[in-house]
C-alpha cells in the first residue's frame, strides 16, 4: 500500500510560497546593494570634488569656478541625503522580506512535519497490519501442526 497525504497540495503550496519569499528577499538584497553602491559613488565624487575645490582655491582660480564647484558639491550633498533615504528604505524592505521569509519557512516546516507524522503513522499501521497477518499465518500453521 502506498502513502498518500491528503494535504500534499498544501505542502507544495507552502514550499512554493517559501521559494517566492526567498526570491523576494534576494531581489530586496540586490536593490539594497545597488543603493549602497550608488551612495558610495556619490560620496567618492563628493570627495574628489572637495579635493578639486581645495586645489582651485590654492591655485587662485576665479570666483566663478570656485562657486561652480561649490554648487556642484551642494548638489552632491543633496543627492547623498536622498540616497541615504533610499538605502534606509531598502533596508526596511530587506528586513520585511526576511521576516516574511521566516514566517513562510515556519509555515512550511509545520506542514512538512505534519506530513512526516502522518507518514510515520501510516508506516506504523502498515507494519502492525503486516505483523498481525504474519501472526495469524503462524497461528494457523501451529494449529495445523497440532492436529
Image: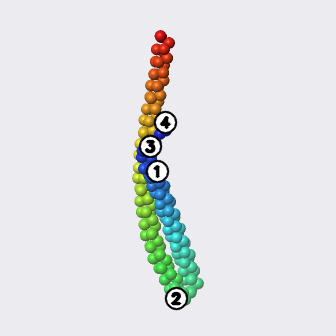
User: In the rendered view, would you say 30 is above or below 55?
Assistant: above
**Between 46 and 106, the one nearer to me in the picture:** 106
Q: CA distance from mark 1 to mark 4?
A: 22 Å
Q: Earlier in the sequence, mark 1 or mark 4?
A: 4
Residue at 45% in and 38% down: 119
Q: CA distance from mark 2 to mark 4?
A: 91 Å
Tell me where residue 97 appears, x and y as whole percent.
44, 59
Q: Which residue is mark 4?
A: 1
| Number of the front mark, 1 or 4 | 4
Q: Earlier in the sequence, mark 1 or mark 2?
A: 1
Q: Which residue is mark 3?
A: 5
Camera-side mark, 2 or 4: 4
Residue 41's spot in the image, x, y percent? 54, 71
Foreground label between 1 and 3 = 3
The tag on residue 63 is: 2
Query: Disc 4 on helix, strand or loop?
Result: loop
Q: Badge 1 is on which residue? A: 12
Amino acid at each position: 500500500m502506498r502513502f498518500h497525504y491528503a494535504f500534499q497540495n498544501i505542502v507544495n503550496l507552502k514550499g512554493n510560497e517559501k521559494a517566492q519569499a526567498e526570491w523576494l528577499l534576494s531581489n530586496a538584497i540586490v536593490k539594497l546593494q545597488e543603493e549602497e553602491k550608488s551612495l558610495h559613488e556619490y560620496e567618492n565624487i563628493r570627495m574628489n570634488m572637495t579635493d578639486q575645490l581645495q586645489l582651485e582655491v590654492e591655485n587662485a582660480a576665479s570666483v566663478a569656478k570656485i562657486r561652480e564647484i561649490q554648487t556642484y558639491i551642494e548638489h552632491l550633498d543633496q543627492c547623498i541625503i536622498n540616497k541615504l533615504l533610499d538605502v534606509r528604505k531598502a533596508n526596511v524592505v530587506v528586513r520585511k522580506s526576511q521576516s516574511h521569509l521566516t514566517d513562510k519557512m515556519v509555515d512550511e516546516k509545520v506542514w512538512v512535519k505534519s506530513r512526516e507524522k502522518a507518514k510515520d503513522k501510516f508506516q506504523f499501521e502498515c507494519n502492525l497490519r503486516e505483523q498481525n497477518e504474519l501472526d495469524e499465518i503462524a497461528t494457523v500453521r501451529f494449529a495445523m501442526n497440532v492436529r
